[in-house]
Amino acid sequence: MKKSRILSKIMYIVLAFWALTTIYPLVWVIINSFKDTQEIVMNSFSLPQRFFLENYQIALENNILQGYANSLIISVTVVFFVLLFGSLAAYTLARFRFKSKMVIQGLVISSLMIPIFATIVPVFGILLKMNLFNNYLGLILPQIAGNLAFTISTLAAYMTTIPIEMEEAAFIEGCSAYQVFKKIVLPITKPSLAAVGIFVFLWSYNDLFSALIILRTRDKMPINVLLTDISSQYGTDYGLMAAVIAIIVVPIVTVYIFAQQFIIEGMTSGAVKG
């Protein structure tokens, strides 16, 4: 009993230290976003002597709001179609038997092991041929494709835990496969859909690599690409860089904090049922 308490205390200390090292960099960035560059160079770990709001003013004058709008357009569209296509494919793989099922499952699982960096050259060529370069759709389509394997495998694993008797009863009552999917499977799968949707949104929002290659004009850049553009212009203005990073990161952290319950519930409920 005593040994268990000591282990628990050690675990709490380790977790507290881990939380501190995770949270402090964000706090450090926010504090420095209210300083000018000279004050940051002199002492970046102190509280600001006065709140230097000009950093945020300059950041907002550099199309930050437009960058936010671009990021939301791209990420929300990607989440919608990934959940739509992914849930349909997952239900098909989880419940139906057909000849090529094992082959498709193998392709889905194997595609999880292919990094996006390995596909960017052929994707770039296809986008050029389809005249989708420097276009929202040119970024949205690769992101949808890149997230489908994770979505299908996660949702399919969850859907296999749903009692098959509920669907069989609905079929006996005269429901079609689509009605069973819409009225029974989707409502039960909501926690997993929410978790996957949040992960896909965060991945799309943070996808700097694809956006940096595909979108080139400033009015179409998402917020993370806009940060690199601003940093190339004001690279030595550390206060401005801190303000831009704070503007980008704080909303995402806020969403993650409020949505963490759905993430944990969605990623663990399938395991509990299994």
Image (cartoon, helix red, strand yellow):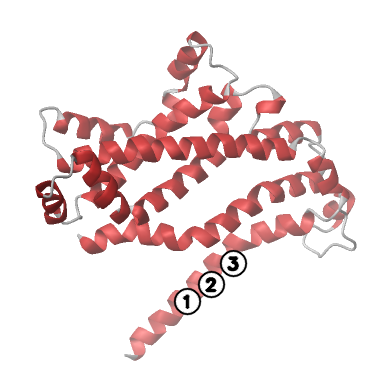
Report whether 76 appears left or right of 193.
right
Please say if the residues under marks 1 and 2 sit with CB atoms less than 8 Å apart: yes
Q: Residue furthest bottom?
A: 2
Viewer-nearest residue: 96 or 61: 96
Element class at badge 1: helix
Element class at badge 2: helix
Q: Quadrant of residue 67?
A: top right
Q: Residue at x 82, y 38 (%)?
A: 61
Q: Residue at x 37, y 61 (%)?
A: 265
Q: Position of residue 14 (x, y in %)?
A: 49, 71
> Which corner quadrant holds the N terminus?
bottom left
Which residue is labeled 3 in the image? 20
What crowding class fits label 1: few (fewer than 14 Cα within 10 Å), some (14-19), or many (20 or more)?
A: few
Which residue is labeled 2 in the image? 16
Which residue is labeled 1 in the image? 12
Q: Amino acid at mark 2?
A: Ala
Viewer-nearest residue: 231 or 139: 139
Q: Choose the circle earlier in sequence order: 3 or 1.
A: 1
Q: Residue at x 89, y 63 (%)?
A: 49
Element class at badge 3: helix
Q: Position of residue 226 (x, y in %)?
A: 69, 34
Report whether 259 appears left or right of 165.
right
Q: Amino acid at mark 1?
A: Tyr
From this view, report whether residue 138 is shown above or below residue 126: below
Please say if the residues under marks 2 and 3 sit with CB atoms less than 8 Å apart: yes
> Which corner quadrant holds the C terminus?
bottom left
From this view, report whether residue 154 is shown above or below residue 29: above
Q: Residue at x 59, y 39 (%)?
A: 72
Q: Position of residue 139 (x, y in %)?
A: 52, 26
From this view, report whether residue 140 is shown above or below residue 84: above
